């Protein structure tokens, strides 16, 4: 939408090629533009945007602020977008949270997104390309939705704000869509590393819990503790909780607050393939029972499925270990992500809290569920999951934040609730001495 300049060539022999607004340029793998290591495209105006006409997102054609660098690789052309952090957030926040959410929720999301990105500015995710992050859910979704006035305002209202731990380090500001009324803690990914995230607490995401915390903060008192995370690790306690509704929970009326997932025809071959796929991703998390001990071993033919049970729960009740007894072996699946992957058949649909049906793709909505099996001739032929929430369950629940904002709580209240002991810091003041 403005004039732009392409620069390419070998070091010391760089060529600058001007173009006018609206001009199309085609870049292919065998293009002369790759005479050097990489080429760049930069708009003449700081506010200019460059469109990649063959990249389609939810918004349609993608356009980018800042400059682009294109790098030729064996697998294709890598596109690197370099732009100011704040402008990056203009496209992250609406891609990660609906722009129609209350402003205080959007501001909380903006601080989370800025903190997350800032952490990778210090420890780049793609140093081989000179890039910090990618634009997918592996990091944060970027430029899937066009910039929106409400989300841009939230970014500007929180300009330079990140969330830091008591030690002054950027917090791991994880977030997810919807809770089941209780969250998990840092053990949800790796028990051994949970101590790195002491501010991620398993707690009731309810009005009474928020009110207790706000009162404690206003009085300068120590934040109230909770043992709900440990309580929910008990199978019967969690079953009773997840099969009922607590009206005090902020998200009790949300569609994903409760859901059921019925697999009416168990396909043992599909489960075998799912086990093998997850074993190939990380062979320490898919184990086989041998001589009374679970060991890492390649997955062979499983045969018919005899039993499926959650054998261990993490903080807040999330499924941590699943044991599948089959005709030819017994297998332990470790981690909520692997469990969600193995039990999702890719066909069945979830029935949500409001009665609506939802496709689950290749991953169950969450790891917060209980399982009931249907058998025939000693084999599991069907199973039903009764669960709640959408996402991993650690950090900030986005719909919880929305409900909190609608109830009059501020972005700071929301962030303090989900990341206990963390405080807001202004990074530009500290680094550049700006007022």
Image (tube, helix red, strand yellow):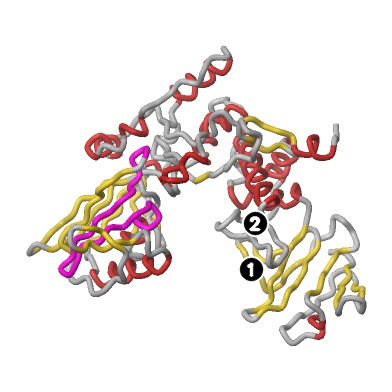
Q: Quadrant of the C terminus?
A: top right
Q: Count residues near mark 1 (Cα–Cα under 10 Å), then give few for <14, some for 14-19, many for 20+.
A: few
Q: Image point 58% across, 14% down: which residue?
A: 220
Q: Residue under circle 2?
A: 142
Residue found at the very far bottom of the displayed protein? 30
Residue found at the very far left of the displayed protein? 377
Can residue 334 be seen in this snapshot?
A: yes
Residue 150, by quadrant, is top right
What label sits on residue 184 in the rendered view?
Answer: none
**Horizontal arrangement in the rendering, residue 286 relative to residue 160 (left or right):** left
Q: Residue under circle 1?
A: 56
Q: Image point 15% across, 68% down: which residue?
A: 327
**Residue 240 sits above or below residue 299 on the image:** above
Q: Secondary structure at mark 2?
A: loop
**Horizontal arrangement in the rendering, residue 45 relative to residue 122 (left or right):** right
The magenta-colored residue range is 315-339
Q: Image point 25% across, 50% down: which residue?
A: 310
Q: Nearer the viewer, mark 1 or mark 2?
A: 2
- x and y percentages locating residue 245 in the rendered image: 32, 34
Q: Of the two numbered discs 1 and 2 on the same chain, state the one appearing first in sequence.
A: 1
- x and y percentages locating residue 67 in the rendered image: 80, 63
Q: Image point 21% across, 62% down: which residue?
A: 330
Q: CA distance from mark 1 to mark 2?
A: 13 Å
Q: Is residue 237 magenta?
A: no
**Horizontal arrangement in the rendering, residue 82 relative to residue 323 (left or right):** right
Q: Quadrant of the N terminus?
A: bottom right
């Amino acid at each position: 939408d403005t004039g732009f300049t392409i620069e390419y060539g070998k070091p010391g022999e760089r060529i600058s090629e001007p173009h006018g607004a609206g001009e199309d340029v085609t870049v292919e793998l065998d293009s002369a533009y790759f005479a050097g290591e990489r080429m760049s495209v930069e708009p003449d105006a700081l506010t200019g945007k460059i469109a990649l006409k063959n990249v389609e997102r939810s918004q349609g054609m993608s356009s980018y602020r800042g400059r682009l660098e294109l790098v030729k690789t064996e697998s294709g052309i890598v596109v690197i977008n370099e732009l100011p952090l704040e402008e990056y957030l203009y496209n992250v926040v609406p891609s990660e949270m609906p722009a129609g959410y209350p402003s205080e929720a959007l501001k909380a999301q903006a601080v989370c997104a800025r903190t997350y990105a800032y952490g990778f500015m210090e420890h780049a995710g793609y140093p081989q390309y000179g890039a910090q992050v990618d634009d997918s859910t592996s990091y944060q979704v970027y430029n899937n939705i066009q910039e929106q006035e409400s989300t841009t305002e939230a970014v500007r209202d929180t300009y330079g704000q990140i969330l830091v731990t008591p030690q002054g380090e950027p917090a791991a500001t994880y977030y997810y869509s919807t809770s089941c009324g209780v969250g998990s803690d840092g053990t949800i990914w790796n028990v051994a590393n949970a101590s790195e995230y002491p501010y991620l607490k398993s707690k009731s995401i309810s009005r009474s819990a928020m009110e207790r915390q706000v009162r404690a903060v206003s009085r300068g008192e120590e934040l109230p503790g909770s043992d709900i995370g440990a309580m929910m690790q008990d199978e019967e306690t969690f079953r009773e909780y997840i099969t009922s509704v607590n009206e005090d929970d902020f998200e009790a009326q949300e569609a994903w607050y409760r859901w059921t997932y019925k697999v009416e025809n168990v396909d043992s071959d599909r489960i075998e393939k799912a086990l093998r796929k997850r074993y190939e991703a990380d062979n320490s998390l898919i184990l086989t029972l041998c001589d009374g001990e679970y060991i890492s071993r390649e997955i062979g033919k499983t045969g018919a499925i005899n039993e499926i049970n959650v054998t261990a729960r993490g903080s807040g009740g999330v499924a941590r270990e699943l044991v599948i007894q089959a005709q030819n072996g017994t297998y332990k699946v470790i981690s909520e992500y692997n469990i969600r992957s193995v039990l999702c058949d890719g066909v069945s649909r979830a029935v949500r809290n409001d009665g609506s049906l939802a496709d689950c793709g290749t991953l169950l909505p969450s790891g917060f569920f209980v399982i009931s099996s249907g058998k025939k001739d000693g084999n599991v032929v069907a199973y039903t999951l009764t669960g709640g929430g959408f996402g991993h369950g650690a950090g900030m629940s986005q719909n919880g934040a929305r409900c909190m904002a609608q109830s009059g709580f501020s972005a700071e209240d929301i962030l303090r609730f989900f990341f206990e002991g963390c405080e807001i810091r202004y990074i530009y003041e500290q680094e550049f001495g700006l007022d």
